[in-house]
Amino acid sequence: MDYRTHLENAWWDIIVIDEAHNVAKRGDRSSQRSKLASLLANRSDTLIMLTATPHDGKGQSVASLMNMLDPTAIADEENYTKDDIEGLLIRRFKKDIQDQVSGAFKERVITIERCVASAREEAAYDIFADMKLQMDESRTRGKGILFKTSLEKSLFSSPAACIKSIDARLRKLEKKYPDGDMPDIATLKELKAALELISPADFSRYAKLLKLLNSTEYGWSPSKNNDRLVIFTERIETMKYLAENLKKDLGLKDNQLEVMHGGMSDKELQRIVDEFGRAESPIRVIVASDVASEGINLHYLSHRLIHFDIPWSLMVFQQRNGRVDRYGQTEQPDIRYMLIDSDNPRIKGDARIMEILVKKEEQALKNIGDPAMLFGKFNQEEEEEETAKAIESGAGADDFEKLLDSDEEEFDPLELLMGLGDEKEVKVEYSDEETLFSDIDYLKNALDIFTDTEEIRYSDLSGTQGVEIKLTDNVKKRIKKLIPPEAMPSDDYLRLSPDREYCLNDMKRCMQNDLAETAWSATQYLWKLHPIFNWIEDKAGVFYKRSEVPVLGLTNSIGVEEILFIVAGLIPNRKSTTVVDEWFGLLYKNGQFDCILSMSEVLQKTHLNVKVPNTQNVSEEQIARGQKLLGDVVDRVKKIMADKCAEYKEKTDPYIYEEMERLEQLEQRHKDAQLTIFDLGIPGMERKKSEKEREIEAIFTNFMDWEKDTLEIEENPYIRIIAVVTGVI
């Protein structure tokens, strides 16, 4: 990897890996994605992995992901239980959060469009059904899928796709049998000739598609900019066929229909996705192979999806439908399946298997949440093999349906491996954070002080007051390192609003209507981590020197004889991350310590959180009295923080002790599981065993050090006096 050195020397607070199943280990080899994820997992305190398909039914794949989260969790990737990975995984289906996102998921409408085969299609189907291929008969029993079965898969996609498959096989056969004496050659040429006679008018599924798109009942029209169409097909030749003929028959311009397939660059695919979600874009139709079925959003202006051919894997069903049936869809998803309706008994029976897949996917989604559980394979290729076996066996659709029904009752591998069936409900309680200012009020108060250099405008954004700041060179220099270049405003006015809903809606509006290179919202969300606050802190830092603090003179709320020190005490862990963070007040009356006040009591006494008062000048005598108390303040804060440190250690030390004991036991389990293989008396094994043992010890030493560095603290607080408040007449 070109960036390995940089990655090894970088450190992140949080790393999020989306579509995490793509970084799981498969067999004995690790992909570059898996190697990258393993490297990043060791360069962050927090790792979050997200996926809708966390496993392929194999324990090793799940174990590899769990070991990225916690390298000490699993000793034997082929043999582990839920106790080994407790707390590492949470799974939620759409039905599990339905009550939390009321109205966010629309009930999808499923329709099977039956396409009655034309005479020319039936002629081709008859040839195919009667076809016997020598190459399949001589194939080693049980090895792979029959060529006739894979040919039927392409036939069920389109005549063009089937011709493509035939041509590819004929080239191989004619090269191997130059005299053409292989009977399969003539058989395949006969089928090809029949397929070449099928025109678009004879291609029943294409004819039905055109009729559907032109019908008033379906209600779709390319003249609408907010009602776009997604058509999925498996084969590239089918995709090309549809793109070429739909442009002609629907009268679409070249820029109104786009294709998406695996041969395109990521940049080009993303361009199409972005434009498809913008109302001003001319794109009305996307015809896609299954490269577009995973991880992309096509739902902003589209709720219509058509399966031109039927996938042989329920995982592909789920991925395709998820492009428009997803969180944020405002319309009811309309899903259509184009199903072959033939008089040929063989084709009719196999089409019935396709129909069962359609119905079972929807049934499983409603009843058990995960259609992949029906096959019990959790792998697209293996699901397709199961469908192929059902077709090859000739057992019939009823037996195939019974197979899926029986698998539905089996354990889900995740429940089997991780015991999610008895997962305890976790309740999180949130408490309101008490602050002196809201984000917007803090910003406004700060800007009122800085108006000597920056131009400020206040604006009403959908009922919420926002702020516009003229980006001077000073501001640009501070924030451009923290904001993506494409998010920097083109007119040099930074627009900020604390209204989350307004910002989300503005973002959607920009995504749908903006034809510029960027879809960034003109108004940015104002929250505590926005870079503008870094700039404010820099500006505020010039008001007081390092050894100075503000002294506020208040009337009415605090007595003249009282001095209140507002103090912050911080204790970091060994990684310099604050673990104990205490803010409180020390109240003195007539030069004598009176009491400790919590921050709630400080605010109640001073009313600083109700309205920022007009401060009065404090006399030199009062300042001198306060300075004399500084030594006592520091001593008392040290004592308070010592008590806080002791409280923290009382809570964490037992946990750290238990954790170290657990890790020692785990280390031995890892050695027992992974070193036994070297005890075979084979020359050179002793050295490899020693290397593996050192590798295990290094993993656990590093993890133990990380836990100690994260949890342990020293009684050496950082004390800061935030402000001093006293009364004035």
Image (spheres, grey):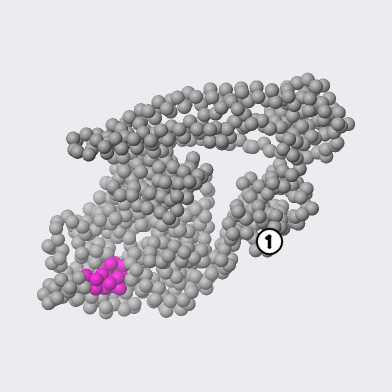
Q: How many labels does the image show?
A: 1
Residue situated furthest right in the rendering: 729
Asked where in the image residue 233 lies, by quadrant, the reply is bottom left
Q: Nearer the viewer, residue 715 or 450?
A: 715
Q: Which of 631 and 355 is in front in this view?
A: 631
Q: Give the range drawn in magenta.
A: 154-169
> Where 193 sits versus 427, above or below?
below
Q: Mark 1 points at which residue?
A: 492
- Residue 293 appears at what percent x and percent y? 40, 59
What secondary structure is marked by label 1? Answer: loop
- Residue 589 appears at what percent x and percent y? 80, 22
Type of amino acid at the residue the image marks with label 1: Asp
Left or right, 628 with reference to 88: right
Residue shown at 45% from the left, 58% from the top = 296
Left or right, 275 with reference to 90: right
Position of the N terminus by quadrant: bottom left
Q: Is 168 one of the magenta-colored residues?
A: yes
Q: Nearer the viewer, residue 424 or 264?
A: 264
Residue shown at 43% from the left, 76% from the top = 247
- Residue 187 appears at what percent x and percent y? 16, 73
